[in-house]
Image (cartoon, rainbow, N blue to C red):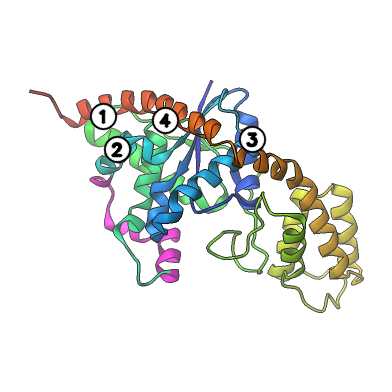
């Protein structure tokens, strides 16, 4: 039985990119593995969220986790800041993380460009905190999308560096896990980059049918192809990428053929895409409504998850302190 870990930042509700990028795989893996699933509220601080909304965002993600199918009886679900050992391991890893490598990560460059007035140390050392999240449970596998592959590679690097520096064989080198499928990166509806809240191009699992229809209708398109079997522009390929994960192969083939024959009508494509997204998200949305009002149950899940996570994390930190050289008088 492998130890599997995944987490999503507490910046609000979960969207299709979260679901198809990692969450769906995690739901499958909890049947056969020892799984830890956390809400990354510490990571969210790099963007200086509104303190009044931080807890509400954590609650929204917890509700979405449960609604999507994460079972607290089978998996450990916890809030990142409830496990203090993660913060301590983050400190130790930072001592072996170097400015040159941290400043070259794609995510740091992107965030620094998007928030030039808030290029903080937490943003720079984001990979070290992510590594701490993973290594604190000595995870074997991490379900990640393509945009997180570099961070996972840095986690492996930090694990090797720690082992080599202290002459031990303690930390495992976790691998990306995608349930035997190609890693999925769900694009946004605006034709640029991945789907995300900060980009304002996301469809959330809890969106109503009307909200989904409205968002899909606004997706960027053009006048259509003029040459048979031509390559699709990125913003059109984005729509087809989403279609492939929410629709049947027959539907995808139908619209691919229309494109290749220069007969595609974007209005029809968007209508089909919206309908299929609504079908996929409907059961999740119904469960979200049910769970959102049950604060007693949500509190129980979070508290019990934190207790279980700290047992695992405390065992790791006990070993790490001894390896580093800390001893009590």
Marks 4 and 3, the one that precedes in the sequence: 3
The quarter of the rendered structure image containing the C terminus is top left
Q: Position of residue 39 (x, y in %)?
A: 47, 42
Q: Find residue 5 and report its horizontal and vertical position in percent.
A: 49, 34
| 173 left or right of 144 in image | left
Disc 2 packing (10 Å; few <14; some 14–19; many ≥20): many
Question: Which residue: 58% across, 41% down?
Answer: 63
Q: Which residue is mark 1?
A: 320
Q: Residue at x 44, y 45 (%)?
A: 40
Left or right, 65 with respect to 250, comes to left
What range of the chain is rendered magenta? Answer: 94-114
How packed mark 3 is, by other alpha carbons closer than 10 Å (few <14, some 14-19, many 20 or more), is some
Spatial CA distance of label 1 from label 3 is 31 Å
CA gap between label 3 and label 2 equals: 29 Å
Residue that mark 2 sits on: 89
The rendered magenta stretch, by its main secondary structure, is classed as: helix
Q: First in sequence, mark 1 or 4: give its number.
A: 4
Residue located at (84% from left, 47% from top): 248
| Mark 2, secondary structure of its residue | helix
On residue 211, the disc is: none
Front in this rendered view, residue 167 or 312: 312
Q: Which is nearer the N-term, disc 1 or disc 2? A: 2
Q: Is mark 4 in CB contact (under 8 Å) with mark 2?
A: no
Relative height, residue 106 to residue 191 (above, below)? above
**Residue identified by numbered label 3:** 179
**Which mark sits nearer the N-terminus, 1 or 3?**
3
Residue 183 visible to the viewer: no
Mark 1 vs 2: CB contact within 8 A = yes
Q: Earlier in the sequence, mark 4 or mark 2?
A: 2
- Residue at the extreme top: 1
For label 4, the residue is 306
Mark 4–mark 3 distance (CA, rounded to whole Å): 26 Å
């Amino acid at each position: 039985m492998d130890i599997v870990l995944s987490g999503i930042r507490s910046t609000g509700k979960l969207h299709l990119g979260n679901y198809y990028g990692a969450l769906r795989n995690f739901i499958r893996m909890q049947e056969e593995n020892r799984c830890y699933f956390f809400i990354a509220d510490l990571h969210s601080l790099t963007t200086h969220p509104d303190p009044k909304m931080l807890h509400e965002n954590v609650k929204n993600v917890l509700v979405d986790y449960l609604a999507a199918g994460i079972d607290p009886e089978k998996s450990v679900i916890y809030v990142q800041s409830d496990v203090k050992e993660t913060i301590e391991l983050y400190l130790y890893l930072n001592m072996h993380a170097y400015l040159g490598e941290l400043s070259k990560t794609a995510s740091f460059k992107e965030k620094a460009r998007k928030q030039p007035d808030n290029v903080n140390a937490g943003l720079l050392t984001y990979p070290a905190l992510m590594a701490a999240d993973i290594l604190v449970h000595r995870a074997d596998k991490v379900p990640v999308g393509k945009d997180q592959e570099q961070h996972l590679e840095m986690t492996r690097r930090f694990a090797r560096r720690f082992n080599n520096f202290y002459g031990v064989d303690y930390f495992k080198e976790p691998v990306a896990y995608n349930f035997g499928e190609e890693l999925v990166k769900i694009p946004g509806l605006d034709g640029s980059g991945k789907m995300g809240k900060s980009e304002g191009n996301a469809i959330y699992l809890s969106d109503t049918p009307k909200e989904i229809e409205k968002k899909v209708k606004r997706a960027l398109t053009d006048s259509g192809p003029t040459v048979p079997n031509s390559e699709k522009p990125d913003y059109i390929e984005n729509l087809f990428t989403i279609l492939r994960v929410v629709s049947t192969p027959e539907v995808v083939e139908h619209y691919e053929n229309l494109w290749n024959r220069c007969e595609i009508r974007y209005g029809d494509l968007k209508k089909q895409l919206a309908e299929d997204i609504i079908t996929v998200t409907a059961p999740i949305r119904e469960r979200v409504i049910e769970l959102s009002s049950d604060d007693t149950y949500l509190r129980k899940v979070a508290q019990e998850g934190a207790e279980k996570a700290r047992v695992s994390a405390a065992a790791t930190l006990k070993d790490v302190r001894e390896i580093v050289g800390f001893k009590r008088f």
